[in-house]
Image: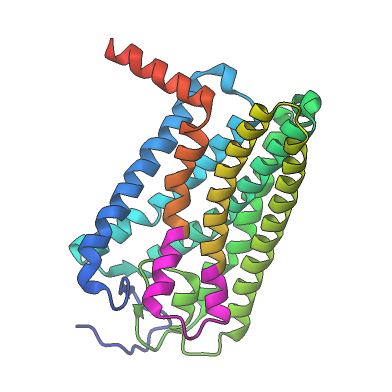
């Protein structure tokens, strides 16, 4: 067992603990996590393949969906394989640089996920509230600009995180009480005052998350107002069903992410295993649900997938 204290400015490796208090259940917890990852990968790759193959799907909604699918693939792949190695193989060691790299991908792509949820909410708002000008408002150029802004925002605000941690001295334990390299879990291991660093991270995450959530809520409020004004009751119910499923996915993402953020700031009495388990949910559940809600429940994608399956079978 390597010593817990070191005189190095930073350790060569960290040790991931997993979910404290539930170590005896790691093997069982890994089964549903692995199943969700498989569904996320297959579902998101299918969406990308279908949209790429069918030119009729090169519309704003599906282009934003492809951006979300790429984000989901990167987000889940940056966490799940390493997490399953921890759960099933007991592989706790993670190199310092690998830890910082994983942290960058997790936090920046989580921010991108939030941004693409907002972009898709704006697309739905324009499509329902101003359908005649949908394609003229959301042109290919504007869609590309929105996508670039979302990516730049995620990279710009969270690139400082690994850089800041690289500068800190680590002379305490090198055990990370988490299933992955979360920023707040790693910064606690530094042997100096990190109050300003913690405040920066929490402030950035809070401002970005709350701003996106408020704008999404406003978009769906306008959408619901337009839906209730539709003359056909059947069309209203159909639109409500579609919006309802989208809102459910968004609520899962923001509620679990918000719980994790506010627990770091206010929830000192929340048990560690509950906090960490929920922190895993906002990385696992949206990539798992998005292909089902935005893919399977979308008629055009569903029809193209069924057509491709019939061709392959025949």
Name the quadrant of the C terminus. top left
Secondary structure that dominates the magenta span: helix
What residue lies at 58% left-to-right and 30% top-to-bottom? 62
What residue lies at 36% left-to-right and 36% top-to-bottom? 42
Which image quadrant is residue 210 in?
bottom right
In the image, taking residue 224 as reference, residue 190 lies left or right, namely left
Image x and y of residue 41, in percent: 38, 41
Q: In this orientation, does residue 100 appear?
A: no
Outermost residue toward the front in this view: 233
What residue lies at 69% left-to-right and 47% top-to-bottom? 149
Name the quadrant of the N terminus. bottom left
Q: In this orientation, does residue 86 appear?
A: yes
Does residue 29 lie above or below 197 as drawn? above
Does residue 6 lie above or below 113 as drawn? below
Image x and y of residue 234, in percent: 64, 27
**In the rendered structure, does residue 87 fall within the stretch colored magenta?**
no
The front one of 249 and 63 is 249
**In the rendered structure, does residue 277 fall within the stretch colored magenta?**
yes
Does residue 314 lie above or below 297 as drawn? above
What residue lies at 32% left-to-right and 43% top-to-bottom? 38
- Colour mapping used in the image: rainbow
Which image quadrant is residue 18 in?
bottom left
In the image, taking residue 308 as reference, residue 163 lies left or right, namely right
In the image, taking residue 261 as reference, residue 306 lies left or right, namely left
The stretch in magenta equals: 259-281
In the image, taking residue 30 as reference, residue 167 lies left or right, namely right
Image x and y of residue 123, in percent: 69, 37
The front one of 93 and 285 is 285
Figure label count: 0
């Amino acid at each position: 067992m390597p010593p817990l204290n070191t005189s190095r400015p930073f350790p060569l490796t960290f040790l991931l603990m997993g979910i404290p208090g539930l170590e005896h259940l790691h093997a069982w917890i890994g089964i549903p996590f692995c199943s969700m990852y498989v569904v996320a990968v297959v579902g998101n790759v299918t969406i990308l393949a279908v949209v790429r193959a069918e030119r009729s799907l090169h519309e704003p909604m599906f282009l934003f969906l492809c951006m979300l699918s790429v984000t989901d693939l990167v987000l889940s792949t940056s966490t799940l394989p390493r997490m399953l190695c921890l759960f099933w193989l007991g592989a706790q060691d993670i190199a310092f640089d690998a830890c910082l790299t994983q942290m960058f991908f997790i936090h920046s792509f989580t921010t991108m996920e939030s941004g693409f949820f907002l972009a898709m909410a704006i697309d739905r708002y324009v499509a329902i509230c101003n359908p005649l000008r949908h394609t003229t408002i959301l042109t290919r150029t504007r869609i590309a600009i929105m996508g670039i802004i979302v990516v730049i925002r995620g990279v710009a605000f969270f690139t400082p995180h690994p850089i800041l941690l690289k500068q800190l001295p680590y002379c305490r334990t090198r055990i990370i009480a988490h299933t992955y390299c979360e920023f707040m879990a790693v910064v606690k291991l530094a042997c100096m005052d990190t109050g300003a660093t913690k405040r920066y991270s929490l402030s950035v995450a809070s401002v970005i998350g709350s701003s996106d959530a408020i704008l999404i809520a406003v978009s769906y409020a306008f959408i619901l107002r337009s839906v209730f004004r539709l003359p056909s009751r059947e069309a209203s119910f159909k639109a409500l069903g579609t919006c309802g499923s989208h809102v459910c996915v968004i609520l899962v993402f923001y509620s679990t992410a918000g719980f994790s953020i506010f627990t770091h700031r206010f929830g000192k009495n929340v048990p560690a295993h509950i906090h960490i388990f929920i922190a895993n949910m906002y990385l696992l559940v949206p990539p798992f649900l998005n292909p089902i809600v935005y893919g399977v429940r979308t008629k055009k994608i569903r029809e193209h997938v069924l057509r491709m399956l019939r061709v392959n079978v025949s």
